[in-house]
Image: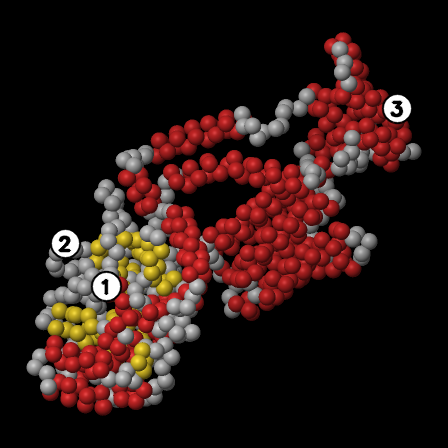
């Protein structure tokens, strides 16, 4: 005891107690499983396997202490060498080490290694902190509602492990512990929700996720035969749209994307010469809507053809909205940065309007390599019998309509002269085949033309529209009467593609995604739409809840923007009120300890210094009886304390008797410090 007293006098911390109780290991093991599971889809198989093997060995060593081989494998030196080797393997596997994916994988291994070598209370504390951070890192990969749902049981396990680690000698059953943690979470939920809504937010994200964290599907700046057809096999959401007013008709749902002028005889690509412009003309019939664009790691945004203004973060009066992109001279909208996370923007369009840039088209809108001579000859024949450009275009569309062309998602492969082979040999193709051939015919006839890619259609789901990758489409634009005008040759072959979507045009196409197929059962389609509605609400009101959304809500409620001092006073006031409510909460079943309980805790602490720990579910009488057997020199004193505590705590005594017994208890308890000794001395 002299060593303990000296440590207290010198301000030194006592020895770090060992983790002996199996309940601590079990609680930490449950936490490890729930924290690691969300990462399995994002880590290499060997990393996940290593983490769970280390955790399993630690549980095995705790549950079966007589087994020696798990303890030998969990030697601290071996674990350290294994973690270092894993770091080297991660560097080789990923090609770099200081990045999101290898860093998360290395943290995963470190958490498992720390659990494997857990020996002392300090190890438990460190492991709890690391587990919290590892749990948060799953949001580096995805911020979906599913990831939030997987976080909830991990948080419950975290609270349970924290409670067990703080009081391992008084472990209660699992269900009451989880109920207590759940109650604490529910009590804090209203305050957290209030702060989430009213706490000021910075205008724009504090950081953006790495580009490789996001989806890569979507349109490209190149279009080759089969490229859009391949994309149409995906049911992934491209973007969602909320309209302020009437919903445009299906034939008006052309969502403009990359515009392509350059043709190499086989494929099309953008030339990158477009410049920012401002459109001339009124916007009386404009549609206002909000687009929630999924990440595609490109700069282009999508809008109904034709957009008449650049995208903005908000258009509410009194809100300082930010411009999120530029309207280019080719009608495309480009963002200032690559879209590496979900982007929400306000847009205005006039469906069906022609695009007037006030200048003649570039020379490359007539360029035509000589790799498709039969297509050029067809254009000359159709041109010879046409009195105007409009009549020629009508004859080309009639050619597609009357000749045996077929709209299919699985056309025959084309060779070095794809346009010629499509027009005269195979006569079957997807939208990119028809748009490419139509544009080539117009250029061969001396009409400036270009290809536009994007999406056509969209499915309503409640109050918003879903545009999927399966709605990807390509069409053409021709320069007529000083304006660019849209022509869709696919509609001449398959009008159902525009009016009913791809499922109406290809009802028997098994290559389409399940959601886009006509034979999909109603209940499955409704289920998928409901799931999408939940994801949309989560994205709209939680993930995308930013400064602009907060300002819009405040503007609609007529609440002015608060000053900093008002925010501070408000938060402190709400926190104070909430604490008072919690103190009076019916859920709070705890009371202040009595003087007898406080005195008993001092005795338990004294026994702890002698090396005697209180066992779970052990009564005070049983503890003091067991201690008397291990401390013979204090047997009489401990026996008297046991009788007095039993009388004071559980017997009905009058005031005089209670005062007498309390004085006796105090006198006997004061004798404990004078008789402190180590276990090995008192047992002799």
Q: Quadrant of residue 252?
A: bottom left
170 vs 462, left or right, is right
Query: Where residue 641 is drawn, which disc sits there?
Result: none
User: Is residue 621 something that shows in the picture?
Assistant: yes
Colour approach in the figure: secondary structure
Asked if labels 1 and 3 touch by Cβ distance under 8 angstroms, the answer is no
Query: Where residue 252 is drawn, which disc sits there?
Result: 1
Label 1 to label 2: alpha-carbon separation: 17 Å
Asked if labels 3 and 2 touch by Cβ distance under 8 angstroms, the answer is no
Which residue is identified by label 2?
284
Residue 617: horizontal and vertical position, in percent?
Answer: 76, 35
**Residue at image point 34% right, 50% down:** 204
| Of callouts 3 and 1, the N-terminal one | 1
Residue 473: horizontal and vertical position, in percent?
Answer: 30, 70
Q: Residue furthest right?
A: 684
Q: Secondary structure at mark 1?
A: helix
Which residue is identified by label 3?
636
**Residue at image point 32% right, 34% down:** 563
Q: Residue furthest left?
A: 387
Quadrant holding the C terminus: top right
Residue 61: horizontal and vertical position, in percent?
Answer: 75, 54
Instruction: Determine whether 557 is above or below 143 in the image.
Output: above
| Of callouts 2 and 3, the N-terminal one | 2
Label 2 to label 3: alpha-carbon separation: 99 Å
Q: Residues within 10 Å of mark 2 (few under 14, many from 20)?
A: few
Between disc 1 and disc 2, the foreground one is: 1
User: Is residue 165 something that shows in the picture?
Assistant: no
Residue 572: horizontal and vertical position, in percent?
Answer: 43, 30
Asked if labels 2 and 1 touch by Cβ distance under 8 angstroms, the answer is no
């Amino acid at each position: 005891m002299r060593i303990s007293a000296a440590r207290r006098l010198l301000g030194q911390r006592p020895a770090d107690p060992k983790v002996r109780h199996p309940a601590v290991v079990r609680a930490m093991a449950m936490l490890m499983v729930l924290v690691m599971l969300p990462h399995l889809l994002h880590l290499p198989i060997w990393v996940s396997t290593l983490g769970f093997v280390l955790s399993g060995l630690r549980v095995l060593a705790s549950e079966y202490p007589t087994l020696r081989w798990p303890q030998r494998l969990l030697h601290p030196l071996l674990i350290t060498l294994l973690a270092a080797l894993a770091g080297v393997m991660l560097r080789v596997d990923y090609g770099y080490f200081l990045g999101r994916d290898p860093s998360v994988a290395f943290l995963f291994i470190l958490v498992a290694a720390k659990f494997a070598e857990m020996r002392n209370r300090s190890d438990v504390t460190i492991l709890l902190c690391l587990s919290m951070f590892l749990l948060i890192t799953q949001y580096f990969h995805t911020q979906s509602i599913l990831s939030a749902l997987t976080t909830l049981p991990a948080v419950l396990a975290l609270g349970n492990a924290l409670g067990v680690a703080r009081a391992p000698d008084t472990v209660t059953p699992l269900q009451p512990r989880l109920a207590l943690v759940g109650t604490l979470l529910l009590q804090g939920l209203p305050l957290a929700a209030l702060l989430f809504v009213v706490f000021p937010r910075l205008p724009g994200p504090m950081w953006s996720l790495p580009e490789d964290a996001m989806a890569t599907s979507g349109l490209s700046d190149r279009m080759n035969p089969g490229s859009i057809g391949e994309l149409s096999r995906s049911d992934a959401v491209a973007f969602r749209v909320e309209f302020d007013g009437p919903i445009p008709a299906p034939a008006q749902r052309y969502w403009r994307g990359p515009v392509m002028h350059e043709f190499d005889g086989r494929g099309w690509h953008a030339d990158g010469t477009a410049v920012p412009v401002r459109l001339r003309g009124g916007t009386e019939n404009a549609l206002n809507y909000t687009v929630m664009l999924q990440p595609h790691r490109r700069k282009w945004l999508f809008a109904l053809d034709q957009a008449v203004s650049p995208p903005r973060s908000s258009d509410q009066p009194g809100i300082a909205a930010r411009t999120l992109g530029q309207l280019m001279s080719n009608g495309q909208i480009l963002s200032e940065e690559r879209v590496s996370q979900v982007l929400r923007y306000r847009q205005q369009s006039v469906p069906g309007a022609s695009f007037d840039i006030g200048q003649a088209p570039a020379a490359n809108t007539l360029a035509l390599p000589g790799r498709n001579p039969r297509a050029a000859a067809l254009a000359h024949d159709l041109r010879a019998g046409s009195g105007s450009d409009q009549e020629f275009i009508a004859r080309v569309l009639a050619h597609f309509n009357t000749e045996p062309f077929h709209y299919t998602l699985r056309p025959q492969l084309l060779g070095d002269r794809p346009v010629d082979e499509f027009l005269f040999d195979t006569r079957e193709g997807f939208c990119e085949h028809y748009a490419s051939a139509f544009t080539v015919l117009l250029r061969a006839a001396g009409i400036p033309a270009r290809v536009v890619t994007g999406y056509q259609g969209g499915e309503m789901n409640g109050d918003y529209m879903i545009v999927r990758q399966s709605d990807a489409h390509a069409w053409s634009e021709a320069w007529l009467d000083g304006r660019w005008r849209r022509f869709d040759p696919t509609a001449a072959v398959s009008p159902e593609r525009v009016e009913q979507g791809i499922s109406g045009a290809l009802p028997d196409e098994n290559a389409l995604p399940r959601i886009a197929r006509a034979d999909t059962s109603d209940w499955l389609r409704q289920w998928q739409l409901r799931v999408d509605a939940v994801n949309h609400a989560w994205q709209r009101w939680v993930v995308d809840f930013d400064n602009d959304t907060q300002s819009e809500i405040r503007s609609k409620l007529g609440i002015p923007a608060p000053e900093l001092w008002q925010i501070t006073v408000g938060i402190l006031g709400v926190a104070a009120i909430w604490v008072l409510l919690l103190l009076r909460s019916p859920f709070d079943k705890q009371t202040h300890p009595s003087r007898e309980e406080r005195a008993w805790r001092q005795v338990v602490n004294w026994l702890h210094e002698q090396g005697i720990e209180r066992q779970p579910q052990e009564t005070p009488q049983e503890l003091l009886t067991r201690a008397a057997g291990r401390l013979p020199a204090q047997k009489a004193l401990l026996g008297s304390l046991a009788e007095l505590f039993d009388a004071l705590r559980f017997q009905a005594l009058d005031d005089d008797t209670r005062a007498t017994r309390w004085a006796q208890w105090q006198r006997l308890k004061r004798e404990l410090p004078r008789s402190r000794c180590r276990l090995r001395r008192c047992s002799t």
